[in-house]
Image (cartoon, coloured by chain):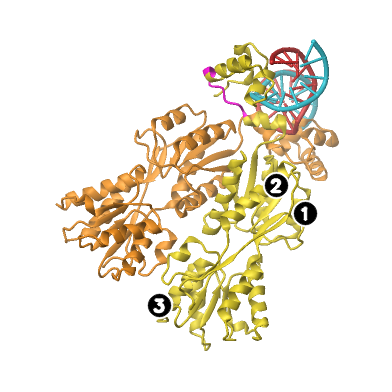
Chain colours: A orange, B yellow, C red, D cyan
Amino acid sequence: MSNITIYDVAREANVSMATVSRVVNHNPNVKPTTRKKVLGVIDDLGYRPNAVARGLASKKTTTVGAIIPDISSVFYSELTRGIEDIATMYKYDTILSNSDQNIDKEISLINSMLEKQVDGILFMGGKITEEHINQFKTSPVPVVLAATYDPTNTLPSVNIDYEAAAFEATMKLIGNEKVQPAFITGDDYVQSNYLKRAGYERALSESGITLDENLIAKGQCNYDGGMKSIQKLLKSDYDIKQVFVVTDETSLGVIHGAQDLGYKVPEDIEVTGFNNTRIAMMVRPTLTTVMQPMYDIGAVAMRLLTKYMNKEEVGETEVILPHRMIERDSTKN
Amino acid sequence: MSNITIYDVAREANVSMATVSRVVNHNPNVKPTTRKKVLGVIDDLGYRPNAVARGLASKKTTTVGAIIPDISSVFYSELTRGIEDIATMYKYDTILSNSDQNIDKEISLINSMLEKQVDGILFMGGKITEEHINQFKTSPVPVVLAATYDPTNTLPSVNIDYEAAAFEATMKLIGNEKVQPAFITGDDYVQSNYLKRAGYERALSESGITLDENLIAKGQCNYDGGMKSIQKLLKSDYDIKQVFVVTDETSLGVIHGAQDLGYKVPEDIEVTGFNNTRIAMMVRPTLTTVMQPMYDIGAVAMRLLTKYMNKEEVGETEVILPHRMIERDSTKN
DNA sequence: ATGAAAGCGCTAACAA
DNA sequence: TTGTTAGCGCTTTCAT
């Protein structure tokens, strides 16, 4: 039991609780000698301030909540690192919870974090529903979305422009050929997939290509999913020469799936991924992909949240971070 | 301001705060009619219990602290998912902090979590020093180590037997050849590297091979580090036919580094990794490796912590989880 | 089954 | 510069 309280320190140092509190909180209104004396007693007694009591009295907990689909995914764990680094910089702790993009879990996590009196919430998810919006609007503390689109464009958020990125990637793939690259994606329920598809389709239409739905494969957005999707496509009657894939991990599955069937990448089939996670370099040929600054998304989102929490002036409420095509060896030239 | 308190509910429902508290805490000593009435008011008013106040009064916060080297690493993020899932199951929230295995940061994180009155701490780190031990021994709440060795064998912990695993992997590589496989590792400061090296050396000695230090390469434990290490080794005068590598990611670097120099894996050079992370399957040839149940380590460690927090009977305090060799295509049968 | 009341350890006016 | 004193919102005896 660390039952040494501010009161014990006060008594031992012959000052009032208030003075001890001032010392602990670096309030300048304390005579240096007094400060020294109090600090000495604090050290002797091994006093440790109780943040819970402080939180109750001050109505600030210096902790923020982060709701994340799955911390074990490469994408989100890197994003989380960005969040945490900035949080630490601003002296916040982070309560992290996984939602698996399950709406009920998300809502209940928001409530549980609010009960814990977090000073702010960072939300990452698949789709923002009305219920979400409702929760956020009535939240007593600020909420910022990271890598999560708000269809109503009304919540503070940090994203990249998925539609534009997918458009560029697809255009690059098309080049002068005017044939439709295949598209390997996941559930459109996930807003980012939806937007990537929109960009893909716009690239087709701007290139004068009529969309053939058979060239769009939906599956799990992971290695196995990619492998299955490409092999199904390759065994069809279509002559696939190019594929745009919504994530890097899925792309690795696509590359290996094609190679296992005897296709050469990029000679027989070109592959472009998305995210530029570390694994994009860990494959032969190395993966051409769209760089998405995951760490930065987390960092910027957290920084934005601190502004709201401190009631600072906020410039942009909807931040779009830049993306960039990274050409490697899985595409020709 | 969610300034609706238990007191408001009490007044509105014509009962005392105590009764509202009982309802909120599912205390059975409440007449069903009263309960219903209170629940109704809670709903009407949109009352949300204040966990901070509860924490102060009850001296329990139902949150645990997790200190982790780096959440963005595949290894730790998977481990963390195990922690979080079990924490959720037992109704705990988790405050997560990255230490980068910096001792000062680790110590200060422990203190900061203790100030926040966490009910327990899960610690993951490189090396446990005397200072750590001291902190843990004097901690008012239980501490459990995950994937972290305690040289004094005195703290509760969950690990696998790295020495034995490395021994097996090395023996397998040696086979009947009696030649020393190369060993690609990181800093011995990291206890797991130290133990893996011990297992490696024991395998040599039990095979009657005299250790040649030149066949041990130390570098960064990541993709680039692996690539650099193998290429340096391959350009030496030694005829390298086998390599044991301390992590999977490093192994991918080794495989590609060798392939880039024209070597064939496993024909010219066999590679065995460690961890069996997802990327072990995302390489050609697929990686032979030692499976380490990362998710389970986290899950079991968290479960162990709950036992301590609830003052349940604890059987083993030092849990060793099983490991297993997974033979794939980067080694010859 | 319910209520009254004393804290939990701290902050933040306000006074001095 | 320092001290006094109310709370913060809840749990938890102890009565009833």
Give residue A310's position: percent from left, percent from top.
Answer: 53, 35
Q: Secondary structure at mark 1?
A: helix
CA gap between label 2 and label 3 equals 48 Å
Residue in the picture at 57% in, 25% down: B48
What amino acid is at disc 3? Asp
Do pointers 2 and 3 mark residues of a single chain?
Answer: yes
Which residue occupies the foreground of this view, B148 or B68?
Answer: B148
Residue at image mark 2: B111
Pointer 3 chain = B
Query: Image height check: is A291 above or below B139?
Result: below
Pointer 1 chain = B
Inspect this view and state whether residue B145 appears: yes
What amino acid is at disc 2? Asn
Residue in the picture at 83% in, 36% down: A13
Residue at image mark 3: B260
- Does label 2 or label 1 sit earlier along the sequence? 2
Residue at image mark 1: B134
Tell me: A74 left or right of B301. Answer: left
Instruction: Pick out the residue farthest to the left.
Output: A208
Q: Residue B251 lies in magenta, yes or no?
A: no
Picture quadrant of residue B329: bottom left
Pointer 2 chain = B
Badge 3: residue crowd in 10 Å (few <14, some 14–19, many ≥20):
few
Residue in the picture at 56% in, 22% down: B47
Instruction: Pick out the residue farthest to the bottom.
Output: B237
Badge 2: residue crowd in 10 Å (few <14, some 14–19, many ≥20):
some
